[in-house]
Amino acid sequence: MADRYSFSLTTFSPSGKLVQIEYALNAVNSGVTALGIKATNGIVLATEKKSSSPLIDPPSLSKISLITPDIGMVYAGMGPDYRVLVDKARKVSHTGYKRIYNEYPPTRILVQDVARVVQEATQSGGVRPYGVSLLIAGWDEGVEPDSGDVQQIDEDGEPKKATGKTGGIMKGGPSLYQVDPSGSYYPWKATAIGKHATSAKTFLEKRYTEGLELEDAIHIALLTLKETIEGEMNGDTIEIGIVGPPADHLLGYEGVECSQGPRFRKLTKEEIEDYLTNL
Amino acid sequence: MSSPFDINGGACVAMVGKDCVAIACDLRLGMQALTVSNNFPKLFNFGPSTFLGLTGLATDVSTVSDLFRYKVNMYRLREERNIAPQTLANLVSSSLYEKRFGPFFVSPVVAGVNYTTGKPFICGFDSIGCIDFAKDFIVSGTASEQLFGTCEGLWEPDMSPDDLFETISQALLSAVDRDALSGWGAQVYIIEKDKVTKRLLKGRQD
Amino acid sequence: MTSLVNQQPHSEAIGYSFSQSTHAPNKQHSFYPYTDNGGSTLGITGADFAILAGDTRSVAGYNINSRYAPKVFKIGGDDETGEGAHILLSVVGFAADGHALKERLDAVVKMYKYQHGKPMSVRACAQRLSTILYQKRFFPYYVHAILAGLDEEGTGALYSYDPVGSYEREQCRAAGSAASLIMPFLDNQVNFKNQYIPGSGEGHALEPKKAGPLPRSTVEQLVRDAFTSAVERHIEVGDGLQMMVITANGIEEIYTPLKQD
């Protein structure tokens, strides 16, 4: 009954704009910068961990999250909204995919599912749009594009071409997406979101090259972060997540031939500091 | 004998060979002892080299095959790729378990060659989706006991597509000839990585 | 033993203190004097021999009562070992009835020899077995019997029976719990059903492969294959394979172990 009067708060302005979404983008653009770079053999997500007080215990802050073993996510904007989206992304990856197909969703499918959640907040009653932009990085197991060369030979021995109506464009490998408060999403080679997104993107445009390796990408990510960071840069103040080779040491066991560790993992404080000393 | 699984009759079998699989079914549709049709195939294609066989209550065979045509088409549109046999198997399993307390009276069989790995894959299910991953063969339908006997006696590992065709055909025809509710011709698909061959078998017409 | 007298479980097995279980007005008494002891038997004939085989497991429900309980017997022998017998009988179903039936037929065949001074022919024995079974038409021997021997021409003879005496001479027959598994395999491999001569024609002109008597080694291998297959897929079949081969030289018994799981 209550929802009869819960009109959507996101309504069109006479000029055709949804100002609520623009306000949400303002929240994003005043948020801490986060960036992502896609390499040939992986992806890096990086952000600054800004604490308002020196009394805050840094390790308990976490801005980069694992969604599925091969997909990770970072944000710029409102922290509480992000945590809700992380919960929903993790949930939908199971209810909408793993419980049906017994495998985790490909990155694009998860991005679409998260984007739907975000979009629904722009059209539903009684809610406000999410005040975050997301960077979602994931790895997909190699799915060859449809070659369509499977032949059907019927009773007469006549070969007939199998119908390849929907040629697959989904190749395996890394992919990096950005999801905005409007629910739109974009695939990127490298991008940044948040307060210093523009300058970071200009920096990335200069440093990005085709055929980048993951190690180079991490290096570039740190350099980019250095340009925009306000405080000191160390293992406590920045956060890095990578999508790389399967991390079998995180499996918790060994000896099973076919099981594979998560490709997404966060770098430890020590790993980050190692990279920083080599910067 | 009034089990919903035994009203319409029918049989289905899938076998693994070397880099190939075969799936076959009979063509009978009956109402108890009365044969109504001799052209009721129980095999359905869900992408290149991926097949689903369904035996059991004929109305559920049609409904379930239509349901999976819808689900697999949606999958293909959403993911822009064909469904792999393993993925189809898990989809079948979860879909059947959704109806845990009002199940479809079908015994499905999935057979196919994974188009990325090239690995042959077969599996069978009970009516509420418990998967039976088999390395050799899967049988289902009113002639399942007979099929267990013939398959266990005739199957051997690493058969060529031609040998596999001969084996599955002999196993199915001999089995359905000892089951009054199955028979009246048969359909066989031999599935290789980049080739699918369909054959119709006449069999005994009684 | 327990399954002989089928006790109806108490209608209120869970004894609640407030339940009135002092009188049971609708208590049903039932008496079911049969048990299915499982197992399978199989007979195949050749030009000058007949093989009768059976597994040696005896079960009651999911329990294995015995791993060596023979189902194939020599009929009309001179002593306890069955020496001198020229007829084989296999019984599968209710083992007690099978044993009783075997004892009766054995006595009948022996009496025939004493009275007529010559051994009973397999044909006569087959007819007599039918009569014995039909005499108990309304309290049958709960068995599927197969009789084997050599006929007047010396070729293998095989007769199979239903529990009340219907019988038929056949080339091969499987009986018992795994009959439905074994029989279609036999149709295909003994009688060559669904097999055609390659290149003999197109469509209806295609010539069926003719079935003829198989050599003994082939038949023995088929029996072994049929049973190893049945053991894989039927829990009531296993432990041991007892094969009796009857030829003009007498009866040879071969025992080979089967899987015990």
Image: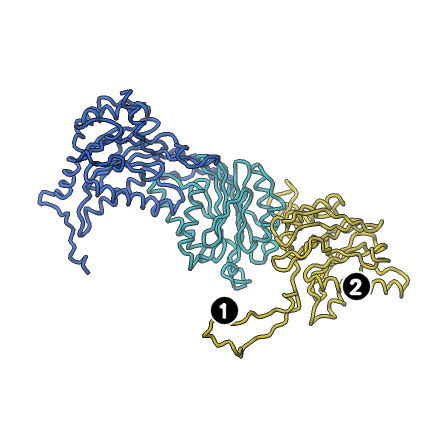
Chain colours: A blue, B cyan, C yellow
Return the residue at label 2. C105
Task: Locate the C terminus of chain A by quadrant.
Answer: top left
Q: Are marks 2 and 1 on the same chain?
A: yes
State which chain disc 1 sits on.
Answer: C
Q: Would residue B110 be seen by someone viewing this image from the given angle?
A: yes
Q: Nearer the viewer, residue C117 or C70?
A: C70
Classify 10 Å Cα crowding around label 2: few (below 14), some (14-19), many (20 and above).
Answer: some
Say the numbered circle drawn on residue B97: none
Q: Amino acid at mark 2?
A: Leu
Q: Nearer the viewer, residue B43 or C142?
A: C142
> In the rendering, at what x and y percent does residue B44 appear?
45, 48
Image position of A177 (left or right of C120): left
Q: Quadrant of residue A200?
A: top left
Q: Residue furthest right?
A: C117
Closest to the observer, A188 or A54 = A54
- Can you say whether B147 is above or below C24 in the image? above
Which mark is on residue C14? 1
Instruction: Please state the horizontal and vertical placement of residue C195, each as a whole percent of the image.
Output: 64, 46
Q: Residue furthest front?
A: A55
The first of marks 2 and 1 along the sequence is 1
Mark 2 or 1: the one toward you: 1
